[in-house]
Image (cartoon, helix red, strand yellow):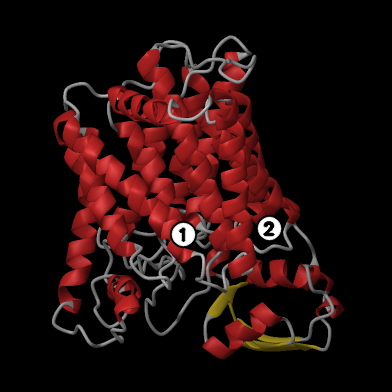
């Protein structure tokens, strides 16, 4: 039975409808993975996002439930900005596009903005790849490529330094793969091979429970699915229909709901949810990634290259101006580290890129030659604030902007720091009103990662 409002808009042809339904299921799974890996049970917004994702998993054909996930994730992102996972920003940009499509449909029929979603993946992936073209990434002693290698093989008990013969190759290999993926996805004839490469590469990144890539892997899989022809989704739904036909029609929805809820409760009870300090939920998400990745490879190898699902951004029924504006915002976000604006959430993760102090270690892209807030670096000597205390112990520097943002939330913390060579000591940060002044919009939109003055160390 078709429920009013649930299937609205998924009527642009069987292929387009099937593509939207399958994507919605994968999108819900990606959000579940993110919550389980990166959220704490004490966060109400995380429970809201998890509930929205589970409801969408139960009925992925419901465009209103897709809207619920998009809104919940944007609220989740807004709550955590500016310092949060890069793929949370990727989810956010994609959900902005989905929200735009849902608003534009006005109840007349929802069209999945496939070109925008694929372009969002290409921009974020390409930005991360280009950011790796710097001296630090190709320095084996500090390269994130080497760190990623040992994270991936940690499940096999291999300690850092045990694969020294392979270490010099890793920066070149990872940079080559990450640069190849967006270029290959752009060309119809290489698109299927690019999907296979993405699946295998991210499988490798997610091999170990200690690796942090498994939730990002699920996000990438859901978006790269849209690079396949729409007929791939039709094949999935046809197979699902054959399986569903074996069950009594009246029980299918209840069985799905109960199974999903039982699985979630089992994971929660056994692992204590998990959260960022635990890796116990990795197995469940790794099995999901294995299933989705295997399906993507089969579909990529079994569809015709010339029948591409990715068309121009101005597809019939999609307003061009809102999407163009969103793309411009994404480009500004990507360029922010090189402009001296911000380094958090700009898709430079695990790249060893440094653009602080008015300089850039990038081979091709210089820093804009002007003083910027991210260049006003402070040495934290000691603090009762947990984050700032950890920074002091590590020897990293923080920007004046970040110091003020942290202390505006903890004005009673003790702090001693050097700025411009001058030592400042306060038993409580509130002794200096400027130090604890809250600048809401700047503190919410702009984030600076900590800076290692000794070397271009690996940063998430």
Which type of secondary structure does the marked residue at label 1 adopt? Answer: helix
Q: Name the residue under label 1.
A: 284
212 left or right, relative to 429: left
**What residue do we see at 65% from left, 37% from top?**
71
**Which dot, 1 or 2, sits closer to the camera?**
1
Q: Nearer the viewer, residue 306 or 262?
A: 262
Q: Are marks 1 and 2 in contact (CB under 8 Å)?
A: no
Number of numbered discs: 2
Q: In which quarter of the image is residue 120?
A: top left
91 left or right, relative to 80: left
Q: Which of 75 and 396 is in front in this view?
A: 75
Q: Quadrant of the C terminus?
A: bottom left
Mark 1 and mark 2 lie on one chain; the one further toward the N terminus is 1
**What residue do we see at 41% from left, 52% from top?**
288
Which type of secondary structure does the marked residue at label 2 adopt? Answer: helix
Q: Name the residue under label 2.
A: 443
2 lies above or below 116: above
Image coordinates of residue 365 in percent, x first then y, are 31, 56
Image coordinates of residue 66 in percent, x first then y, are 58, 31
Q: How crowded is mark 2: few (under 14 residues within 10 Å), some or many (20 or more)?
A: some
Q: How crowded is mark 1: few (under 14 residues within 10 Å), some or many (20 or more)?
A: few
158 left or right, relative to 50: left
169 lies above or below 231: below
C-alpha separation, residue under disc 1 versus residue under disc 2? 36 Å
């Amino acid at each position: 039975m078709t429920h009013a409002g649930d299937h609205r808009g998924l009527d642009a042809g069987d292929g387009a409808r099937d593509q939207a339904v399958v994507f919605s299921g994968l999108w819900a799974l990606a959000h579940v993975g993110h919550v389980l890996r990166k959220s704490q049970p004490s966060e109400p917004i995380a429970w809201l996002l998890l509930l929205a994702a589970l409801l969408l998993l139960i009925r992925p054909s419901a465009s209103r439930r897709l809207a619920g996930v998009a809104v919940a994730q944007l609220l989740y992102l807004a709550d955590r900005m500016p310092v949060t996972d890069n793929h949370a920003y990727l989810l956010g940009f994609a959900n902005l596009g989905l929200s735009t499509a849902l608003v534009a449909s006005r109840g007349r029929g929802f069209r999945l903005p496939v070109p925008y979603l694929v372009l969002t993946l290409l921009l974020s992936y390409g930005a991360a790849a280009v950011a790796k073209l710097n001296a630090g990434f190709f320095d084996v002693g500090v390269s994130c490529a080497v760190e990623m290698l040992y994270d991936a093989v940690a499940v096999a008990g291999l300690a850092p330094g045990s694969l020294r013969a392979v270490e010099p190759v890793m920066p070149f290999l990872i940079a080559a793969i990450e640069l190849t993926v967006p270029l290959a996805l752009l060309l119809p004839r290489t698109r299927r091979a690019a999907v296979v490469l993405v699946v295998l590469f991210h499988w490798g990144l997610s091999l170990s429970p200690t690796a942090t890539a498994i939730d990002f892997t699920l996000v990438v899989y859901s978006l790269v699915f849209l690079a396949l022809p729409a007929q791939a989704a039709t094949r999935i739904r046809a197979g699902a229909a054959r399986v569903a036909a074996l069950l009594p029609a009246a029980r299918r929805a209840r069985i799905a709901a109960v199974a999903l809820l039982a699985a979630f409760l089992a994971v929660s009870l056994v692992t204590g949810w998990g959260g960022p300090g635990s890796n116990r939920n990795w197995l469940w998400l790794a099995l999901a990634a294995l299933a989705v990745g295997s399906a993507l490879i089969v579909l990529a190898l079994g569809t015709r290259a010339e029948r591409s699902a990715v068309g121009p951004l101005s597809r019939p029924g999609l307003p061009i101006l809102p999407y163009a504006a969103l793309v411009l915002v994404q480009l500004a976000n990507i360029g922010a580290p090189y402009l001296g604006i911000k380094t958090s959430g700009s898709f430079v993760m695990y790249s060893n890129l440094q653009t602080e102090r008015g300089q850039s270690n990038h081979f091709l892209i210089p820093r804009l030659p002007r003083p910027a807030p991210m260049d006003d670096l402070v040495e934290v000597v000691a603090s009762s604030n947990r984050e700032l205390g950890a920074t002091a112990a590590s020897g990293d520097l923080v920007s004046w902007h970040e110091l003020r943002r942290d202390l505006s939330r903890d004005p009673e913390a003790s702090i001693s720091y050097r700025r411009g060579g001058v030592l400042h000591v306060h038993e409580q940060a509130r002794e200096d009103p400027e130090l604890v002044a809250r600048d809401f919009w700047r503190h919410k939109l702009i984030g600076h990662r900590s800076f290692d003055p000794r070397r271009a160390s690996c940063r998430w």
